[in-house]
Image: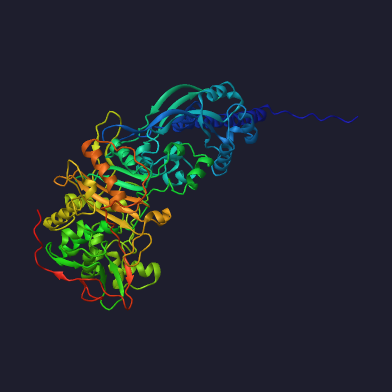
Amino acid sequence: MRARRERIRNPSAEAAQFRLRAFVGFGLVLLALAGLAAWYFRLQVIEHDEYARQSEANRVKPRPVVPARGLIYDRKGRLLADNVPAYRIDVTPEDAGDIPRMLAALSEVVELTPEEIARFEATRKATRSFRAITLKQRVSDEEAARFAVDRWRFPGVEVVAYLNRRYLHGDLLAHVIGYVGRTDENDVERYGEDQILFPQTGRTGIERYYDAQLRGRIGYEQVETNVEGRALRSVGMVPAQAGTDLRLGIDLELQRAMVMAFGEQTGSAIAMDPSTGQILAMVSLPSFDANLFVNGISSVDYRRLMDDPSRPLFNRLVLGGVAPGSTLKPLIALAGLDSGLRKPEDRVLSTGMFYLPGTRRGWGDASRGGHGWTDLRKSISASVNTYYYRLALDLGIERFDQYMAHYGFGSPTGIDLAGEIGGILPSPATKLAARQERWYPGDTVNVAIGQGDWKVTALQLVRATAALAEGSLRRPHLVAQTRAGFEAPWSPLPQPAPVPVSPNPANVEVVRLGMADTMQPGGTGWRVALDAPYTMAGKTGTAQVISRRGTASVDPRSLPLHLRHRALFIGFAPVEAPTIAVAIAVEGGGYGGSAAAPIARKIFDAWLLGKMPDPVEPATGAPSPDARPDFGNVLTDARPGVAPRAGRSGAHEAPVIDHQPAPARP
C-alpha cells in the first residue's frame, strides 16, 4: 500500500500571498475607479459645455426665419411691389424615403403638374439630400388642409408658409422693377449657402440690381421638439432683418400716361428730372406681366412671349440701341461752339446736296432745294444736315469722338439696372474691329447726322438732353430713397457729383434757343407745340433703316415694319425752368416729327398739367403735312449730263461758311 505523502501547509506563506493578491486587486479597483472618476470629471467639467450643447441640440432645433422682402414704392408713396401670404410644399429627400412612391401618393392629395415634378427631380439631382427642395410653389388653402390631415403619411414633406412677391401693376413697370424667380443652385454659388433659404431671388430690373438689400437677413428661432421631431415651443430667437424698402423717382401716373401716349406703337421712352437725375417714367413697349415669372413661368406662357415678333421680353431701355439720327445735332452744335470752330452767328449755305471735294457721291438735306444760309440756331430748328457735314469734317473724327464721349455716348450711363449696354460710338477703331476697313471722310459725314455705325440708347439720349436743359451731366437713377424697416425714416441715396456739359454756359444757352426754335413755326416740331400753355424745346430725328438715293422720298407705309424708319425725339419743358426731359424712340414709326414728338407732348401735358392722354389709334407712320423728316445718310451718284442744282457753282463744291452775323431773332 502506497503511503500518501501529505503536503505540509504553510499558513504564513498563504497569508502573505493572499495579502499580495488582495492588494493588487484592490489597486486595480482603485485604478479603475480613478479612471472612471477622471472620465466623469472630463465629461462633467472639462467638456461640460460641449456635451450640454449637443444634448440641447437633440432637444432644440434652429428654425430659419426668412424676412419679408423689401417693398417698392413710387415717388408719392404708392405701392408698386409687395408681399402676400402663400404656401408651398418642401421635400427633404433623405427623410422622404422612396421618392417616386412619395410623389405618386402625394399627387392624390395635392395637384402636381408634370412640370413641377420634372423641376423637382432636376433640382434634387443637383442638391444635397439633406436640403429641403420646393416641390410646389403655390398651394391653395384647400390643398394645405388636405395635406395636414394626411401629413403622417409623408415624412420629410412639409407645407411651409412664406411671403410671395406681387406686382400690383402687372405689365406697367415690368421692365423697370423686373421680377423675382425661384432660388436655385446657381444663386447659392453666387450669393452663398444662406441664399437657399430665400424662396425667391431677383432676376431682372430693380429686383436684381438691389437684390442684396431687398432680401434682408435670415433670422433663427430655437424650437423645442419631442422625440418625433414635432415642435413644442419656442425657447429663443435671433430676429430676422427685413429687407430694405425702396422709393423710386418714378411717378405712377406719368408712367401710365407714357404707355397711353404710345398707343399701339412699339419703342421706348424715358422722362428724367434734369436737376436731380431721377427717372420720372420709363417704358419699353410692348411689355409683359411680371407676375408670370414669380413662381416659375409655365412653358405655354413662356413660349407665347418668346414667339411674339414684337419681343415683349426684350428690355429696350438698357439693351436696345438705335442710330440717333438728327437728335445728335444739338450736341454736335455744342461741340462746335466749345471747340472754337463755330460761333453762333456763323452761317453755312445749304443748297440741298453736299459733296466732298473730288468725289461724285453726295449727301442730301431734308429739303430738296436746300435751306439757304443757315446759322447754328436754324441748323437745329430746321435740322439742316449740311451744317453738320461741314462741322464734323472740321472737327475731325478724333475730336468729334472726344466730345461725344464726354456727352456720355459709347459707355453705360450707370443707371441702377443690370445689363446696361454702352452702345457704339463710331470711330476708326470700331470700324476696323467690326469690318476690317479703314475710316474715310465719308464715314465722318455719315456720323455727323447720327447715321452710320452709331448705336445709342434712350438712356444716353435723355441724359444728354437733361444736361442741355440744366447744364450738367448727371447719373440717371431710379431709386431716390431707402429705409431699413417700416418705422425707419427715408434716407436719400447718395449720387455722384454732376459734371458740367460745357465749360461755357453761354454756349449751352444758344443750343437751348435752337431747340426752342424747333417747336416754333418753321421748326420741325412746331405743330406739336400748338396751343401749349407752356414752352418746350426739342429736336426731332429720323433714323433710317434703309437709305435713299438722291432726293427721292420713301413712304414708310410701303415698307415692312422692321425696315421702317425709327422715329426719335428729345426735348425738355418748360424752357425757362425745365422740370422734365424726355427721349423717345418709336420703332417703325416713320418720322420723328409725326410719330415721336406727339408722344412727347402728351408726356409733357401729363407732367406739367396733370392731363392724361386720350386713347389713340394705331400710328400709320405717315408724316404730317408740315413735318420734315430729319434724314441722314442721304446719298446720290452725280452722273454725267446731270446739271447741278440751281444756286450751286459746282457739283463738287463744299458749303460756304459765312462768318457774318445772322439776322437778329426775337
Q: Where is residue 81 in the image (x, y as percent from the top left)?
A: 36, 34
222 over 646 or under it: above or below: above
64 over 439 or under it: above or below: above
245 over 594 or under it: above or below: above
Query: Is 147 on the left-hand or right-hand side of 217?
Result: right
In the image, 424 versus 516, the foreground residue is: 516
In the image, 68 versus 654, the foreground residue is: 654
The quadrant where residue 153 appears: top right
106 over 584 or under it: above or below: above
- Is residue 52 in view? no
Query: Is 276 on the left-hand or right-hand side of 255?
Result: left
Q: Where is residue 9 in the image (x, y as percent from the top left)?
A: 72, 28
Query: Is 76 on the left-hand or right-hand side of 576?
Result: right
In the image, 373 versus 480, the foreground residue is: 373
In which quadrant is the N terminus drawn?
Answer: top right
Q: Residue at x 30, y 34 (%)?
A: 484
Q: Residue furthest right?
A: 1
Query: Is 506 on the left-hand or right-hand side of 410?
Result: left
In the image, 84 versus 349, the foreground residue is: 349
- Is residue 484 in view? yes
Q: Where is residue 14 in the image (x, y as percent from the top left)?
A: 67, 29
Q: Position of residue 119 (x, y in %)?
A: 55, 40
Total marks shown come to 0
